[in-house]
Image (cartoon, rainbow, N blue to C red):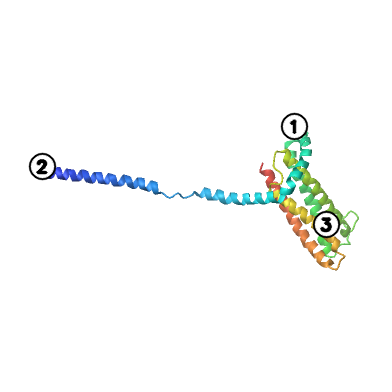
Amino acid sequence: MKVSATNIIALVALTLASSANAFVAPQSNSFVARKPLVPSKNAFQTTSSSSPRLGATAMQMSIFDGVKAPIQSYVDIWTPMFKSAQASGLAPDFLLHWGHGAAMASVLLSMGVIGAYMGWQIRLGNGEEVNQLTLGDTIREAHPKIIGGAFFFFLLGGQGGLVLLDTQGQSILESPHAMTALLSVVLLTCQALLPKLFSSENGQTARDVHAYLGSATMVALFAHLATGVNLGLSF
């Protein structure tokens, strides 16, 4: 009887030990198997940061779809000449990379700023004054000449910018810089047309629009400068 009781106690102990081991192991496996698959924070950050870029790129592509092919064909005429100059050492990489930006920034910070200043001087009633900036003309006479010259250089320099991008193996018309360029050209074109309405019955309204739209155009041009610097630093 004593032996039987000892055997029973030993059997119960072994059973409890086996039960404990059987319980612990499945619990660990069950936890691993049922662990929820939560996306990492990086996944959300990547998705959220890339979505606006994808949207912006899609919008840029849709805007330039109709003109990208002919513009690319035009750029292809000039690209071999610049690549040849690059290969021969006549055009250093630094000049190809930053030359366009330096030239256009010079036009904006000189002719653009002076022209905008003169425009507001005319609006404030100082259009008949002559100073060192007008080179003998009145402010009213010098304003359209300076702004018109800046617009000409912007159009000419924009073509050079596209060619230099292509020379460096970059895509054209697929950046915020291209978008701000289009916006700036549209605004400058509107500004060039508005003075045609100054002598009409809505002349005062046209003058008001010209003044404030001119300030908005300068904001767009400085945004274009900022996106250009960002583009230049990106490659």
Residue 120, compared with residue 93, is above or below; it is below
- Amino acid at dot 1: Ala
What number is the disc on residue 87?
Answer: 1
Outermost residue on the right side: it is 136
- List x then y, in percent, for residue 201: 85, 68
Q: Secondary structure at mark 1?
A: helix
Tell me which numbered mark, 2 or 3, is placed earlier along the sequence: 2
Foreground pick, 34 / 224: 34
Tell me which numbered mark, 1 or 3, is placed earlier along the sequence: 1
Tell me which numbered mark, 2 or 1, is placed earlier along the sequence: 2
Quote the CA–CA distance across marks 2 and 3.
114 Å
Does residue 26 appear left or right of residue 64 in this picture? left
Task: Answer whether residue 118 is visible to the viewer in this image.
Answer: no
Q: Quadrant of residue 96?
A: top right
* Residue of label 2: 3
- Amino acid at dot 2: Val
- List x then y, in percent, for residue 19: 25, 46
Query: Are there few (<14), some (14-19), or many (20+) residues within 10 Å of tag 3?
Result: some
Q: Secondary structure at mark 2?
A: helix
Residue 73, compared with residue 110, is above or below; it is above
- Amino acid at dot 3: Ala
The residue depicted at 62 percent of the width and 49 percent of the height is 54
Quote the CA–CA distance across marks 1 and 3.
41 Å
For the N terminus, the quadrant is top left
What number is the disc on residue 192?
Answer: 3
For the C terminus, the quadrant is top right
